[in-house]
Amino acid sequence: MKKILSLFGAMFMVLACCEAPEISIIPQPRQVEAQRGCVKVAGLPVNISQSREMDTRVEWLGGELAARLSLVTGKPSALAEEGAGICFVQNASLPAENYVLTVDSKRKSIDIQASDYNGLFNGVQTLLQLLPPEVYGDKACPGVKWVAPAVTIEDGPRFSYRGMHLDPCRHFWSVEETKRYIDVMAMHKLNRMHWHLTEDQGWRIEIKKYPKLTEIGSMRKSTIIGALNENLEYEKEHGHMREDNIPYGGFYTQEQARDIVDYAWKRGITIIPEIDLPGHMLGALAAYPELGCTGGPYEVWTRWGVSEDVLCPGKEAMFTFLEDVFTELMDMFPSEYMHIGGDECPKTAWEKCPACQKRIKALGLKTDAKATKEQRLQNYVTSRLQHFIAQHGRKIIGWDEILEGELEPGATVMSWRGAEGGIAAANAGFDAIMTPNTYCYFDYYQSDKPELEPLSIGGCLPLEKVYSFNPVEGIPEEAWGHILGAQANLWTEYISTPAYLEYMLLPRLDALSEVQWCDPATKDYNAFLTRTEKMFKAYDVLGYTYSRVAFGVPGMPGAEGGSYQ
Ligand code: TNX
């Protein structure tokens, strides 16, 4: 008996030596088959010889992986041309963005197979999550057991469009801060960043032909402070809103924008730029008042909300302006899609504007049961832009307001006022991206106790609600193909520091990634929560700020009394 026990003990020792960290991956892979044993990764070479032809980025990816392993394990890993190790293998039979990851304890090797670059990239992200969280750090941790558990993972995404939006207009994010945002998106296998580059509160992208856009349009003289409701009370009493009277601004040069595009591209992410038009345009109007109905003067806005001053489609110069802007934009951003905004465009200025009314008459636009003549004028703006952008081989995305009245085939609708816009679009044969404020607005509070949270715009979007989102809900099965995917939006009216930005993003991004990636039948919120807690260790190593309110701990770390402002 004793002998048997000691034999068991010895066997246990052998297994324990090779005991690997528990498998915990976000987004949850489609199929995980764990085996006994593990593979030591310290000093493993990265062999890209069987995938180099696939894409020019493969060498970069292999080099990054080798450098990361070398750094954290303290033992050099290098790119190799032959032999076992971590092998990137091209396998044309796999669907786009899919991968098969095999950690083989017998061969002491790790294979990542994919048919395209994004598949390989996704496989590498999974491999990193199989390793101890210190893998994300910037120092050698020789005391950590650098092993990957033996496993075969077959994986691929549910949706082809897996987006996250960023608003650098209400508050500005530096190139480095934007890259950190992209990093955490890449970790979660997202593949689109919607970059909202223009607003009433600031124009943020250099356009060489119109230098005043950034000279004048990127600066506001002040920012309103305090909550909207509280400010309305204050305004009633004082006749103006509470402001900080501190000038605020910032913009990206074209060179910086290209750098970000390249940075994202290496991480499998396409940047979709948005020029929000014809509303939300005070940044441009302050710089070029002749583009508005009254000719101004206009100011870059210091408050939040919806401005009645918008671009004037009565003027031909306005179209020339937009075409020039998109010409430079398409040169900077290789994305198939250009976002043209289209949301929240009040028509009061157009109703009073002789040039707009003249254009309405000339086009024969009429008010009917479906839309007013001014709404149809916005349709005309959308259509002209759509044609111009199509001439350059690109397509448009617009917020769901572009559906009101008439919309030409080929446009993609971004549904934000609930899911209705997306449902209507898909039923009418348009592609749609689901970003409903009911599930995807990360500027909303994460709990129903806002007094314990940093001041935000309002709303309530807890982690569990994000997790429960099904982008095709309410859409007949035959139209599911029109739902390209889902995205969450992070508007930054009240979000003025990188820590607060990350706090609003994490861990709701974790939930979003499973909405975008996983088959809904396999989703399990409690299992997700367990995996999220593991992810927190990686965030700790990376220094990301995140919310624990779903785990009973409200408030942003480091912010006084839970309140940021
Ligand atoms: C609506 S979503 C907006 C944004 C605001 C956001 C605040 C959309 C297309 N427009 O301009 O920042 O609400 O939640």
Image: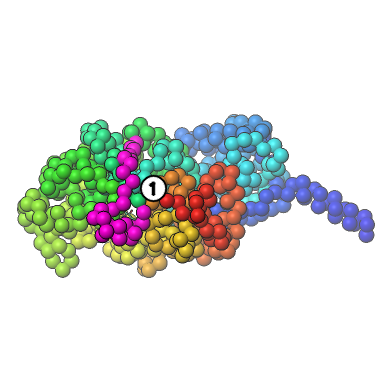
Element at label 1: strand
Can residue 505 be seen in this snapshot? Answer: no
Q: Nearer the viewer, residue 84 or 141?
A: 141
What amino acid does circle 1 point to?
A: Leu
- Which residue is label 1 attached to? 166
Q: Quadrant of the N terminus?
A: bottom right
Q: Residue at x 56, y 43 (%)?
A: 542
| Display coloring | rainbow
Can residue 247 be seen in this snapshot? Answer: yes
| Part of the protein shown in magenta | 226-252
**Number of other residues with Cα within 10 Å of mark 1, as a class: few under 14, some 14 to 19, many 20 or more:** many
Residue 123 drawn in magenta = no
Residue 240 drawn in magenta = yes
Q: Furthest residue to the front?
A: 237
| Side (left or right) of 556 relative to 101 | left
| Side (left or right) of 282 relative to 34 | left
Looking at the rendering, which quadrant does residue 406 occupy?
Answer: bottom left
Cβ at disc 1 under 8 Å from ligand 1: no
| Side (left or right) of 373 relative to 420 | left
Q: Residue at x 29, y 39 (%)?
A: 219
Q: Residue at x 14, y 42 (%)?
A: 290
Establish if 189 lies above or below 366: above
**Rendered location of residue 134, percent (x, y):** 62, 42
Looking at the rendering, which quadrant does residue 476 occupy?
Answer: bottom left
**Rendered location of residue 505, percent (x, y):** 46, 52
